[in-house]
Image (tube, helix red, strand yellow):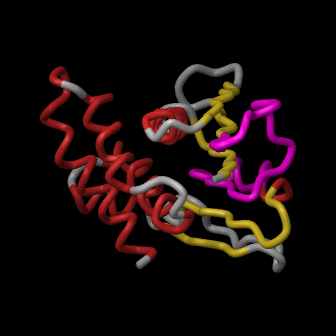
Amino acid sequence: MYLEVIIAGFGGQGVMLIGETICEAATSMGVNATFFPSYGPETRGGTANCNVIVSDKPIASPVLATSQNIIVMNKPSLDKFESKVKEKGYIFVNSSLIDREVQRSDIEVIKIPANEIAEKLGNPVIANMVMLGAFIEKTKVIPIDKIKYVVEKFLGEEKKELIDINLKALDEGVKLIK
């Protein structure tokens, strides 16, 4: 088992939560996972990205110069990370906020209207969960039920009113890939 992904967007888009969720789900399966966050100088609205690696073997370094998978939540992230996708890799594009086409023809582009779907569900903040659902369904390295368990765990009793809508967002992302 091996999965690598760079996840990028503006601060506040839930980029880190996607990475943390993947790592927590992986470790609950008994495999190794690393999470390496990077923040821009601004707090909310600045750039943010993280490197995530999941492996059944030891992980030598948490840093990815290039990645088989990239999730971009906004146009500046596409501009910065498009060149970092490995040949024949996947780039997941939040087509709600990115109005330009990916320029490379050696990778598979998966367009996910994450913000539009989140708005239809009634909460624009859950666009990250739509993207995560699509990513998990496409890569199939971690079962969606493990991801859902972690989302419920992270939200806990304090935010239990948000559990159902987050799980629906994950399901909508999965549906886009099926």
* Residue 107 shown in magenta: no
Q: Which of the 4 image quarters holds residue 55?
A: top right
Give the residue displayed 82% in from the left and 31% down from the top.
60
- Position of residue 99 measured from the top left corner of the image (x, y, whole percent): 62, 67
Give the residue displayed 71% in from the left and 55% down from the top.
78
State which quarter of the image contains the C terminus. Answer: bottom left
- Position of residue 3 measured from the top left corner of the image (x, y, whole percent): 65, 51
Residue 34 or 171: which is nearer the viewer? 34
The answer to whether 62 is drawn above or below residue 166 in the figure is: above
Q: Which of the 4 image quarters holds residue 28?
A: top left
The answer to whether 132 is drawn above or below residue 7 in the figure is: below
Task: Say whether residue 78 is left or right of residue 9.
Answer: right
Stretch of the chain drawn in magenta: 53-81
* Residue 69 shown in magenta: yes
Residue 59 or 147: which is nearer the viewer? 59
Task: Say whether residue 141 is left or right of residue 51.
Answer: left
- Position of residue 73 measured from the top left corner of the image (x, y, whole percent): 57, 51
- Position of residue 79 measured from the top left corner of the image (x, y, whole percent): 77, 54
Residue 140 or 124: which is nearer the viewer? 140
Task: Say whether residue 137 is left or right of residue 107.
Answer: left
Give the residue displayed 63% in from the left and 43% down from the top.
54
Residue 73 or 138: which is nearer the viewer? 138
